[in-house]
Each structure stands twice: as structure tokens, then as C-alpha cells.
Image (spheres, helix red, strand yellow):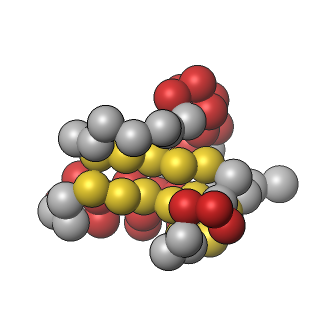
Amino acid sequence: MLSNVHVFGKSDGLREALEERFQRAGASIVEDPSDSELVVGIDQQEEISILRLFLWAQILRNQRLF
């Protein structure tokens, strides 16, 4: 089951593409990071889910979204 995802950082094409890919894979994009199971930071120095991001990339790649 895919989870809630919070993406933060500069709103640009990369962020929009990531959010779209996560949504197409069944995840919900949430505004509050405390409501998310996965936090993706773009050019940020905050606590992010690096390992889980790698696993998500593998899941998305297997679903041929990349």
C-alpha cells in the first residue's frame, strides 16, 4: 500500500514531476510533514526519508513510471 507523501522545497518542474509520479503510483500528497509517511526534500537541510526515497524510486521504476 502506498503512503502519504510530503514534498518540500522550491516549487519547480522537479517538484511537480515528483508529486505527479507519487500520485500516479497511488500516494496522497499532504501539506503537513507530520501527516506523511515519506518526506522528500529538494535542496533542503531538513530530516528526509533518503532510504525510503530510494525504495520508492525502485517501486516507481518497477511500475514503469520513470
Taking 17 as reference, is 53 above or below it? above
Q: Name the quadrant containing residue 58.
A: top right
In which image quadrant can residue 62 be found?
top right
- The answer to whether residue 53 is seen in the rendering is no
Q: Quadrant of the C terminus?
A: top left
- Residue ID at (45%, 47%): 40
Left/right placement of residue 32 relative to residue 37 reads: left
Relative height, residue 66 to residue 50 (above, below): below
23 horizontally vs 36: left or right: left
Q: Which quadrant of the structure image shows residue 27?
A: bottom right
Residue 51 spot, x, y in % from top left: 58, 24
- Residue 60 location, x and y as percent? 56, 42
Foreground of the two, 47 or 10: 47
Name which residue lies at 49% across and 38% down.
48
Residue situated furthest right in the rendering? 1
**In the picture provided, is 37 more to the left or to the right than 1?**
left
Q: Residue at x 50, y 75 (%)?
A: 31
Give whichever of 24, 42 is nearer the camera: 42
Residue 56: x percent and y percent? 59, 38
Kindly tell me whether residue 25 is visible in this rendering: yes
Quarter of the image with the N terminus is bottom right
Q: What residue lies at 39% left-to-right and 41% top-to-bottom?
A: 46
Q: Pick whichever, 44 or 3, lies toward us.
A: 44
- How many numbered marks have been drawn onto this rendered protein structure? 0
